[in-house]
Amino acid sequence: MSGYIDKIREISERLLKEGTVNMVIGFKKGTMPMMNEPCFVKKPENVGTLIWDSNCGINLANYLTDRKEKIAVIAKGCDSRNIVTHIIENKIKREQLFIIGVPCQGMIDRHKIASMSETEILSVTEKDGKVIVKAKDAEKTLEKASVLQQNCTLCTHRNPVIYDELAAELVTEQKDVDRYADIRKIEAMPADEKWKLFDDLLSPCIRCYACRNACPLCYCPTCFVDESRPQWVGKSTDPVDTRTFHFLRAYHCAGRCTDCGSCERACPVGINMRLLTRKLEKDCFESFGWEAGLTLEQRPPLDTYKMNDPEDFIK
């Protein structure tokens, strides 16, 4: 990844020196393994803090909402698709942005790696397609492909869909990926099995809202969970309140979600809430041929109306 880092720093320094942008939004090394942090670089002499590796899973589109500056932002495939959505939804203007595109080869799953060690993990590094995990009591070398986030194993848009300059050569997109095999399996279950599955899925939820806060689509000034007049959902961890929160949040992402994995990555108890958003993603694709964030020329199907829209659901 060193080539990526050098190029990102080179582009960022040039843009800041020339005054093309007021800041660069990228990543710096985190204080904990596998937890790189977003950072705002405003001076050319500080671009040395910028890094890139497989621990940059946070979606940086989350930091663009309603900003007024001229901004350079580092964007992998899913980030760029969310940037498209931000532009379409008038949360930022295209002319404000200089998009540094980073072809992505997948982010590693910190939950999966943490579960492999009984002691504290001291460092996680990469080399030649391998991930080296150093813990207090041992060191393991793993194939990167075996510890990728699930959304990355299913990703068919690893290259940025819009960019002004690339930090590396485009990568080969994954082909013949069955993105919805697990969703179809759930769809085929009897109702009582589905109920149990979702009860088990959501029962660990502590209502911390980390998933909402990490999501680049959750930018409402007041979230529905915080409304009091009317109160849409209770504040407790009662199962009904918890289900209501997750199901409603998923519906708010329908036709907009790029499956960037930020929600699942942020969850402290490891809930796979992507099952909900991917079901809606599948329905949008099957009903409208729609994948979010691939073009600035077309609005999402759920905020437009066409005479030939499918109406089977109301017949």
Image (tube, rainbow, N blue to C red):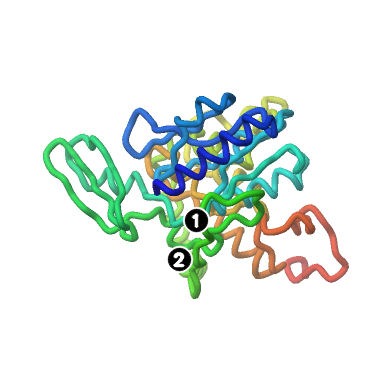
- Amino acid carrying mark 1 in the image: Leu
Quadrant where the image shows the C terminus: bottom right
Residue occupying the point 49% across, 75% down? 176
Q: CA distance from mark 1 to mark 2?
A: 8 Å
Is 166 or 137 nearer to us in this picture? Answer: 166
Residue 190 position, x and y percent, is: 47, 67
182 lies above or below 55: below
Q: Secondary structure at mark 2?
A: helix
- Position of 215 relative to 181 (above/below): above
Identity of the residue drawn at 63% across and 35% down: 15
Sequence-wise, the earlier of marks 1 and 2 is 2
Percent of width and height locating residue 4:
46, 48
In the rendered image, which residue does mark 2 sit on?
A: 182
Query: Residue 216: which quarter of the image?
Result: top right
**Disc 1 designates what residue?**
275
Marks 1/2 in contact by CB < 8 Å: the verdict is yes
x and y, in percent, of residue 6 in the image? 46, 42
